[in-house]
Each structure stands twice: as structure tokens, then as C-alpha cells.
């Protein structure tokens, strides 16, 4: 069958709106539309209401249009997400309009219409709402409608589905002229909406409820018609058969660090893998290259994905690494050349400079789709938008043939001054934006504190811990504070090589690479030297020496393959430099960590991989290692009460201050920064001044 969409449900509930004013109903309607991805994409679509509001100057009621502003998402929008314009001032702009050649001249005019000092930037679709005769308007991007809108027989199919209830307008860039056309169409009372060729849907009504109900009805009709009338195998016969899930995961982890390194010259990129059944159907189809070359049509899609993806021709399952790298380099170079030609051919005198010429969407037969962006959220959204595009192509091919925008039209959208203004309004990237960190011992005090620090500064964190329960709790706490996209993880026993290797595959399939390793997994068992059993000795060395080695080795490999450098940070201890009584196995293992870090620094310098050590002393608060048993033993060793232990460590330091996990996180943050690029093989003591561990 063709279109994959589920027919959307009408979610309007009268009881939820009884006490809402019209402004609040606009928010309610918008959130209902945005909550269903069958109706509109994340960040896509817009809504409006034309209301009578009190003018703060005259105190008289005046007609005001509230319309979703530039950016933002309908699903989560609040009232402050809407621009507000005096309707009389907006309508007067007709006298200023000089024709289609001067579309962009109208954009700076909209702020002159702002109502009540609301400076929320207006959307390019503002005139499309403003000239419609109805007070309540929805604009959405449902896959089913866009499938019709991008069909070669789109106008004919629109008439078949909706009879004379929904009009058709050929593709043109959103702007003042298109707004005037929609205004004329809306004067004909038989129409409840219009399909914009290659773009999406506008619907309207005399109330919020009627407008919303019409939107859902139109989408449902289109979805149902496409499902009933589509031919089988719209993408042609199956050309390839997908690898199983395990093999896909293995092969992705093999190539993705190299790809990430090659496309991260201008800014570091984060990857996202999508291998669901709809993606696999597309990448394995006979018509893959043909459809990919046509490219996406809906502006909401290709602004996120670029017009065309790259189809990797590499056969990664049966070639050596050097051949794989060569094949990928050739594909990437060909894509960049094509994109540069696309820019050169279509640019104007006032066009913004060429942006990143690397692809965003990577299609790989038998494996799926990998998307890359400056952060995880945008990488995931790019993937979701291209899946929308796949669904659109499938729907269009099922009942007609899919058509895309011309390169010139696509360029005019991609390099539109309005899009450039959006980019300029984006906040500056944070200090760790685009960086990926792996943290072992992630549910411990230091692991969690370092994760918070990295997330706070824009990084992506992959947490591991031997306890799945503790790990889940920590990840949930961090998700609640920083969002789910940037914090992921998996259970990992650092002493088990196969478990470590599997964990790194999960990391690479999740984020696409690695820039920072924070090795903070900990264990400590007290015993006098003569009572130190082989079991105690091996336990300390397996976790603190072998575990640190295994994780660092795999991190080193990834960083080397990416060719972007990296930072390896070991959380050692003051015991790595001076011994303490009754912890000989711990001290010896910590000394091994310190020396291993120096060895990594020696070999990593060639690849700009830095390796440094942080030596804490007695981070007791919130520590998993400092359990009741260890506290009691160390207290007896120093002949003090357990409750006096923290004060004991504090008072033996020069600064007489306790050391907390947050203090260690500050040191970790420094070694994560590019500004520490000249530090390797170093030791940073964070111990409140422990004289015996002064480095010398």
C-alpha cells in the first residue's frame, strides 16, 4: 500500500474549552494540531485567530490577528508564541505592495503593524492568514495532503477527494501574492480550505472548533482515499534485503565515526540512526536513487534535511576498512561538488554565503538512514522530517507520480533572507555544543555531577553504570532537567570486554561518535596488606586498571577514526600518588591508572587526543563508593567516629574545605574545553590542598 498514515482523530473536547476566551482557544486548537504528527510536523504549520481586543491607546475594541510567530512548535506553543497585528494596518499594506518581484520588501513592513508592543517575529505565512476572509485559520503539513500536493495529478486528485469543497493553488513561495490569492479563494463560501501545490493545507472556519474539525476531516479524507487507491510497492520491487538488527548496529558503529569526522569541519555534528520498517522499505527499494535525486518538496522538510540526501554506495559488509573509507570519501566529495554547483547556479547577488555543503541525510541500503545536525534534537528532527518526505513520496507514487521542486525554487527557499534571519536569531552555541561525552560510573556522585556540567554547557552525555537500576534513576533525573535527547546510556560492566564493546556500539548508534571520555567508575575495599586476598586485589585491578584500559582503548579508536582529536579524563585519586594504610590494592590500581593516562598522552598526541588525570580526595557526599561498610572501616583506621570522617578529611587539608563532586566536575569541564587543548599528560589535584600530593 501507499500512504502509511493512521487516520487522525478529532480530539476536540467542548468541556475543555467552556471557560476559555478566544485567545486561550487559539492556544488550545494549536496544541491539539501540534500534538499529532499525522497532522503537522514538529515546528511546522501555523494557526491564527482574528479577534476584537482593546487597543491600549484608544481603549476601544479593534480587530487584531494573532498568528503563530516565526519558530516555535504548535504542540507546545503558549500565547507568547503568537505575533499580534492590527488588522487595519495589515490590510493597508496592500497599497504598499508592488508585485511578486518585491515580495521580500513586505517582510520589514509587518513590524509596523504590531499590536500592544508584541515584537514576536512574524512568520512568512502571515499574509496567507491575514487575507483569508475567515477569523479562524489552520495551516498544516500532513503527509497525506503533501502526497496529493506533490503528485503530478495533484489538482485532479484534489477534486476527486474533496469535490468542490477544497481548492487547489499551484506551488509558489509563501508570501504576499499567495496571501492575496488565498483571500480571493476564501470569498467563495463553498470552499473550506485549499491545497497548496508542493506544500500543504490551509483550512478555515467561523469558530475555533469548526476550523479544527475541518482540518481533521480534510486530512482524514485524503488519508483514507490514498489508502484505498494506492498501488502496491510504490517504490518498485525490493532490491536489497535488510541486515538483522544486530548486524545493522555493528555496521553502523563501524562507519559512523569516520563519517562524522568528515562532515564536522565547520562544526561538530551529532548523529541519529533511524532503521524503522518504513525507512528500510525505502532504502532497499529499486527506485531509491531515482526518488532521492528528485528530493524533498515541502519547504518544511528540506529546510531541515536539504533538498537531496546522499545515498552511500559503500558495501560495508564485505570490504576492508581502507576501501570503506575510500568509498565514503568519494560519495561525500561527489555530493559536495553537486551542492556547490547547485549554489553557484542559483545564487543571486544578495544571496547569503554558501552554507555547509555536506549532506544531512545519509541513506544506506540494508541498514537505514543516518542524519547529522549540530545537536541531537535537530539530528532526530531531520530524520523525522525525511521520514515524512518518504511517506509523501510513497503516497504520491502510489496514486500518480511524485514531483519535487525545481532547484531554483528550492534554493530560493533555502537561501531566503527570511531563513537567514532565523539563523541569525539563533542563540550562540554553548561551549560544549556538538560534543559527545561518555561517562563511566555514571550514577555515582562524580559521574552524575560531571554529566550535569557537560549537559549544562550544551554537550551530549552517554552514561554507563554496572547497576541498571541506579543508571535508570540518574538518567531520568537528568532527562527531567535537560531533556531526553541529550542524555542516553546503557548498562556496562567495564571489566567485561564483550560488554564494553557492545556498550560502545550502542553509544555510536545513539550519538554517532565520541569527543570526551570521563572514566569515573570506582571501587574501594579496605584490608591490611597481609589480609588482602587475591579476590580483593583482582577486584580493584579489574575495575580500576583493566576497566579503565578497556574503556580508554575503545574511546581512543573512535577518536582516532574521527580525526577530530579528543579528551580522555581519568578520575584517579590522591592515592595514585601517595599510599594510605589498608588499601594497598586500591592504591596500586590507582597508580596504574595514572601511568596509563600518561601512556595514552604519549601515543595520542599524534592524533590530538589528550589524556589527563584529576585527583580528588575523599568525595564522600552522595558517593556510592563510600558506603556504610567503607565509612566504618576507614573511621576505625583513623580511630574516629564515622560521623567525624568528612571533617577529618577536610581538616587535614590546607584550605580546610570539603571536596564535593561538583568541584571535580569543574576540573572535568576544563579538560573538556577547547581552551585546554594544550594540556595533556597532566595531573590536576582537587583535594583542598593535600601537601603530600603536591606534584613534583
Image (cartoon, rainbow, N blue to C red):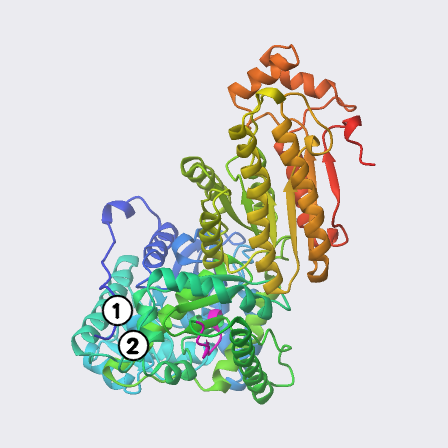
Residue under the image location 20 percent in, 79 percent down: 232
Quarter-wise, where is residue 263 in the image?
Answer: bottom right
Point out residue 235 in the picture as x, y percentages from the top left corner.
29, 80
* Left or right, residue 102 beside residue 53: right
Answer whether labels 1 and 2 touch (C-beta < 8 Å).
Answer: yes
Point out residue 75 in the picture as x, y percentages from the top left corner.
38, 55
Quarter-wise, where is residue 218 in the image?
Answer: bottom left
Q: Quick one: 360 or 610, which is closer to the camera?
A: 610
In this rendering, the answer to whether 56 lies above or below 638 is: below
Residue 471 image label: none
Q: Quick one: 369 or 645, which is closer to the camera?
A: 645
Point out residue 186 in the picture as x, y percentages from the top left corner.
32, 75
* Left or right, residue 424 beside residue 462: right
Please check the rendered image and state whether residue 279 is part of the magenta-colored stretch, yes or no.
no
Asked if residue 486 shows in the view, the reply is yes
Residue under the image location 69 percent in, 39 percent down: 614
SS under mark 2: helix
In this rendering, the answer to whether 661 lies above or below 581 is: below
In this rendering, the answer to whether 221 lies above or below 499 is: below
Residue 394 image label: 2
- What is the span of residues highlighted in magenta in the rendered image? 304-316
In the rendered image, the quadrant that contains the N terminus is bottom left
For this orientation, the residue located farthest to the right is 696
The residue pinned by badge 1 equals 4
In the rendered image, the quadrant that contains the C terminus is top right
Q: Quick one: 285 or 505, which is closer to the camera?
A: 505
* Left or right, residue 311 beside residue 209: right
Residue under the image location 46 percent in, 61 percent down: 272
Residue under the image location 57 percent in, 81 percent down: 333
Amino acid at each position: 500500500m501507499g500512504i502509511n498514515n493512521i487516520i487522525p482523530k478529532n480530539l476536540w473536547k467542548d468541556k475543555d474549552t467552556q471557560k476559555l476566551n478566544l485567545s486561550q482557544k487559539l492556544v488550545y486548537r494549536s496544541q491539539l494540531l501540534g500534538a499529532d504528527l499525522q497532522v503537522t510536523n514538529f515546528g511546522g504549520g501555523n494557526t491564527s485567530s482574528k479577534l476584537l481586543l482593546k487597543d491600549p491607546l484608544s481603549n476601544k475594541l479593534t480587530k487584531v490577528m494573532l498568528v503563530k510567530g516565526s519558530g516555535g512548535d504548535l504542540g507546545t506553543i503558549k500565547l507568547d508564541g503568537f505575533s499580534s497585528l492590527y488588522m487595519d494596518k495589515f490590510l493597508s499594506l496592500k497599497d504598499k505592495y508592488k508585485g511578486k518581484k518585491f515580495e521580500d520588501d513586505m517582510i520589514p513592513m509587518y513590524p509596523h503593524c504590531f499590536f500592544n508592543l508584541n515584537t514576536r517575529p512574524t512568520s512568512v505565512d502571515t499574509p496567507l492568514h491575514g487575507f483569508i476572509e475567515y477569523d479562524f485559520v489552520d495551516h498544516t503539513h500532513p503527509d497525506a495532503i503533501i502526497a496529493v500536493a506533490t503528485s503530478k495529478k495533484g489538482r485532479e486528485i484534489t477534486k476527486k477527494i474533496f469535490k468542490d469543497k477544497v481548492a487547489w493553488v499551484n506551488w509558489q513561495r509563501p508570501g504576499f501574492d499567495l496571501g492575496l490569492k488565498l483571500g480571493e479563494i476564501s470569498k467563495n463560501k463553498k470552499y473550506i480550505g485549499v491545497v497548496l501545490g508542493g506544500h500543504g493545507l490551509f483550512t478555515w472556519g467561523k469558530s475555533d472548533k469548526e476550523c479544527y474539525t475541518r482540518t481533521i476531516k480534510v486530512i482524514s479524507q485524503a488519508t483514507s482515499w490514498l489508502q484505498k487507491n494506492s498501488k502496491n510497492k510504490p517504490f518498485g520491487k525490493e532490491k536489497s534485503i535488510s541486515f538483522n538488527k544486530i548486524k545493522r548496529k555493528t555496521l553502523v558503529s563501524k562507519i559512523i565515526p569516520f563519517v562524522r569526522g568528515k562532515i564536522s569541519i565547520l562544526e561538530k555534528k551529532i548523529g541519529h540512526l533511524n532503521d524503522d520498517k518504513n525507512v528500510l522499505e525505502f532504502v532497499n527499494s529499486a527506485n531509491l536513487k531515482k526518488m532521492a535525486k528528485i528530493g524533498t518538496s515541502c519547504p518544511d522538510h528540506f529546510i531541515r534535511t536539504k533538498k537531496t540526501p546522499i545515498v552511500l554506495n559503500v558495501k560495508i559488509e564485505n570490504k576492508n576498512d581502507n576501501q570503506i573509507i575510500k568509498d565514503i570519501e568519494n560519495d561525500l566529495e561527489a555530493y559536495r561538488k553537486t551542492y556547490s554547483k547547485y549554489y553557484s547556479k542559483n545564487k543571486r547577488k544578495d544571496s547569503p554565503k554558501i552554507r555547509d555543503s555536506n549532506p544531512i541525510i545519509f541513506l544506506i541500503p540494508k541498514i537505514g538512514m543516518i542524519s547529522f545536525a549540530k545537536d541531537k534534537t535537530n539530528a532526530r528532527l531531520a530524520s523525522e522530517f525525511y521520514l515524512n518526505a518518504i511517506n509523501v513520496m510513497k503516497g504520491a507514487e502510489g496514486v500518480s507520480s511524485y514531483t519535487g521542486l525545481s532547484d531554483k525554487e528550492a534554493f530560493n527557499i533555502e537561501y531566503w533572507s527570511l531563513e537567514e534571519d532565523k539563523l541569525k536569531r539563533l542563540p550562540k552555541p554553548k561551549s560544549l555544543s556538538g560534543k559527545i561525552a561518555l561517562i563511566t560510573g555514571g550514577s555515582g556522585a562524580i559521574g552524575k555531577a560531571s554529566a550535569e556540567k557537560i549537559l549544562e554547557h550544551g554537550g551530549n552525555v552517554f552514561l554507563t553504570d554496572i547497576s541498571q537500576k541506579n543508571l535508570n534513576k540518574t538518567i531520568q533525573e537528568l532527562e527531567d532537567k535537560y531533556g531526553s535527547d541529550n542524555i542516553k546510556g546503557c548498562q556496562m560492566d567495564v571489566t567485561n570486554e564483550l560488554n564494553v564493546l557492545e556498550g560502545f556500539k550502542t553509544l555510536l548508534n545513539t550519538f554517532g561518535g565520541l569527543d570526551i571520555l570521563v572514566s569515573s567508575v570506582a571501587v574501594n575495599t579496605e584490608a591490611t596488606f597481609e589480609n588482602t586476598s587475591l579476590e580483593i586485589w583482582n577486584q580493584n585491578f579489574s575495575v580500576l586498571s583493566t576497566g579503565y584500559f578497556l574503556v580508554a582503548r575503545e574511546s581512543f579508536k573512535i577518536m582516532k577514526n574521527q580525526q577530530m582529536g579528543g579528551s580522555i579524563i581519568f578520575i584517579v585519586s590522591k592515592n595514585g600518588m601517595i599510599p594510605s594504610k589498608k588499601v594497598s590494592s586500591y592504591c596500586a590500581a590507582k597508580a596504574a591508572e595514572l601511568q596509563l593516562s600518561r601512556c595514552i598522552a604519549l601515543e595520542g598526541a599524534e592524533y590530538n587526543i589528550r589524556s589527563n588525570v584529576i585527583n580528588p580526595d575523599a568525595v564522600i557526599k552522595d558517593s556510592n563508593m563510600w558506603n556504610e561498610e567503607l565509612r566504618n572501616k576507614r573511621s576505625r583506621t583513623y580511630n574516629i567516629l564515622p560521623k567525624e570522617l568528612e571533617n577529618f578529611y577536610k581538616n587535614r587539608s590546607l584550605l580546610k574545605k570539603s571536596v564535593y563532586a561538583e568541584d571535580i566536575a569543574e576540573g572535568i569541564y576544563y579538560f573538556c574545553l577547547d581552551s585546554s587543548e594544550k594540556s595533556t599528560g597532566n595531573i590536576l589535584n582537587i583535594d583542598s590542598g593535600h601537601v603530600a600530593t603536591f606534584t613534583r
